[in-house]
Amino acid sequence: MRYTISFALASLLTSPALAEVPRVVTDIPPVHALVAQVMGDLGQPQLLLEKGADEHDFALKPSQMQSIAEADLAVWIGPELTPWLERALLGSPAAQLPLLDAAPTLRHSYAPQDGEEHTQEEHDEAGHDHAGTDPHAWLDPQNALIWTGLIAAELTRLDPENAATYAANAEAARARIATLDADLKTQLAPVADKPFVAFHDAYGYFTAHYGLQAAGHLALGDASAPGAAHIAELQAGIAAGSIVCLFPEVQHDPALLTQLAEGSTVRIGGALDPVGSTLEPGPAAYETLLRSIADTLATCLKG
């Protein structure tokens, strides 16, 4: 018995230590959901953006800064969406996976807003790039299909011991995303010819992928205030009856959209939530987010 115990103890002491699952931080709920699906039961990524917070302008807490400093990997959209995380990652030893850079051929650009009164210099000074890349790329499920593979590859690089699990989880995630995509195509096809206006310029990926008729937007890509000429242009379209629905957003006052709709036949739809700021975080949040947007659009556009 003494020999058996001594042999077991010696074996334990000489065996290599098990590799730790990487500590991962993420910026927004849909990215967190994709990483959570790929990690599965091996670990839980940390979501930095708090429920109800603005993804464009967020102040990290000291505890979150500490989490970033201790992280092995940061998976985020990129500075185009969450510049506050770019600043926090300066000097951090964590590996980074900026998803927008990881799929450059899938990028869309913001359409310039007619009649916009602010100069490009003013936008640049404010830290916004309205003329550049649209960062809301998670709203096209084809991007999510690619990203799950990239997330699995980066986790495998950091934790090769669990490579098979990451690969299997990513494949299961892609199957769920493909099913989601097929469902939304069926759901949205009957309203593809119904023009609508959203609160801000965040839905280019979604409308392009599903062939929807986005007739414009009230605010810019970071939800900053529109110019008077642009408001007049929207008023003209509404008065002409060429717009079916106006869609507010959960974090923004709908008063201006409601004012635009007064005296017209245009309908006010439910509030959209492009980043999932009101959702409970977790592996299911990505699917919940896209289904919620599709449901909200279809309900109003069908009339």
Image (cartoon, helix red, strand yellow):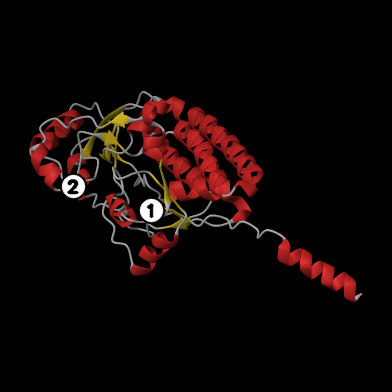
Q: Which residue is mark 2?
A: 127
- Residue in front for this viewpoint, 14 or 132: 14
Can the viewer see residue 118?
no
Disc sitting over residue 277 in the figure: 1
Q: Position of residue 137 (x, y in %)?
A: 38, 36
At a point 34% along the width and 44% down the height, the residue shown is 78
Q: Secondary structure at mark 2?
A: loop
Q: How many marks?
A: 2
Q: Position of residue 175 (x, y in %)?
A: 60, 35
Disc sitting over residue 155 in the figure: none
Which residue in the rendered view is the most extreme toward the right?
Answer: 1
Picture layout, residue 156 above or below residue 229: below
- Residue in front for this viewpoint, 160 or 284: 160
Q: Position of residue 68 (x, y in %)?
A: 40, 59
- Badge 1 local density, few (<14 within 10 Å), some, or many (20+)? many
Q: In which quadrant is the N terminus drawn?
A: bottom right
At a point 39% along the width and 66% down the height, the residue shown is 66
Mark 1 belongs to which amino acid?
Ser
Mark 2 belongs to which amino acid?
Gly
Location of residue 140 by image quarter: top left
Mark toward the viewer: 1 or 2: 2
Q: In which quadrant is the C terminus drawn?
A: top left
Location of residue 20 by image quarter: bottom right
Image side of residue 211 versus residue 262, left or right: right
- Residue in front for this viewpoint, 119 or 66: 66
